[in-house]
Image: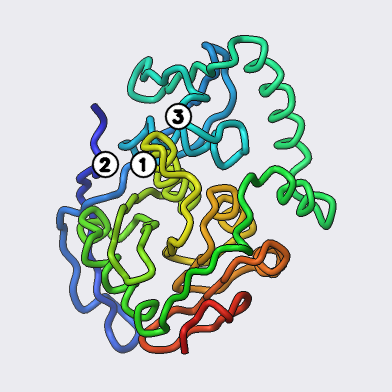
Amino acid sequence: MTGRTARRRVLRVQAGNGAGAPREAGPRADLLAVEEPLEIRLNGAALTVTMRTPGDDIDLAAGFLAAEGVVASPGDIAGIRMCDENVADVTLAGGAAAAEGLRRNFLTTSACGVCGKDSIDAIRVRARYDVSADLVRVSPAVLASLPGRLREAQRVFASTGGLHAAGLFTAEGTLLALREDVGRHNAVDKLIGRALQDGHLPLAGRVLLVSGRTSFELAQKALVAGIPVLAAVSAPSSLAVELAEEAGMTLVGFLRGTTMNVYTGAHRLSV
């Protein structure tokens, strides 16, 4: 099986204070986060390819389909098998006809992309859970503690510095699950896929913390999984904020130290 890290020899250079030769240069070993393609198939037919860090690939395939609104429970998937280390074949309980219809729809929406109000409304219709009705409350102190807890649990990131992380927490700050990947969207799909297979969707009362920024895509995935609170250490996009506001989700950004920006759903913060 492909590993999650790869070792490579690099030239370590330290620049001097002025012009001329570097002050110090020498070879050293460096660990890199592995990036490889994963092809997701439905009933043996290709659906999509995503670049990911190997590991938790069955969770990734299941989470991708859940985030796309294709499946909502473990019973919707008849089975997932790894054909080789970079191919996951998913068999839907609905059979080949359902899979073929999905392939045509997915290829169409992927080609068009996400564009404007109509697309946001379509995402809300596709979401099966009403996060606006979730009564969970989270204290700012708990939110402020989450990035540190996530970093402590990131074993691969600590050795490479090249992976994004997604962590699922309780409102009290207990880490329930962590996934890492070169793509933050893949890390979230891996979390959602594990929850789907364990029968834990919707993820009511939970907090999703992502490293980096929050895009529309990440807000969409959190909404489809029924997560009421989404937090990130960096900035959200305008469309992510718009989707979170319309859906009734709490969206927190720039979660650093003891400060944070609450973009939507401030009523859930028990201040």
Q: Which residue is mark 3?
A: 74
| Residue in front for this viewpoint, 31 or 79 | 79
Q: Which residue is mark 1?
A: 53
Q: Residue at x 44, y 32 (%)?
A: 37
Residue 34: give its label: none
Q: CA distance from mark 2 to mark 1?
A: 6 Å
Q: Quadrant of residue 28?
A: bottom left
Tags 3 and 1 touching, CB below 8 Å: no
Which numbered disc flags the more N-terminal residue, 3 or 1? 1
Q: Secondary structure at mark 2?
A: loop
The type of residue carrying mark 1 is Thr
The type of residue carrying mark 3 is Pro
Q: Residue at x 71, y 19 (%)?
A: 101
Q: Secondary structure at mark 1?
A: loop
Q: CA distance from mark 3 to mark 1?
A: 24 Å
Q: Position of residue 195 (x, y in %)?
A: 40, 43
Q: Position of residue 104 (x, y in %)?
A: 73, 22
Q: Which residue is mark 2?
A: 4
Which numbered disc flags the more N-terminal residue, 2 or 3? 2
Tags 2 and 1 touching, CB below 8 Å: yes
Q: Residues within 10 Å of mark 2 (few under 14, many from 20)?
A: some
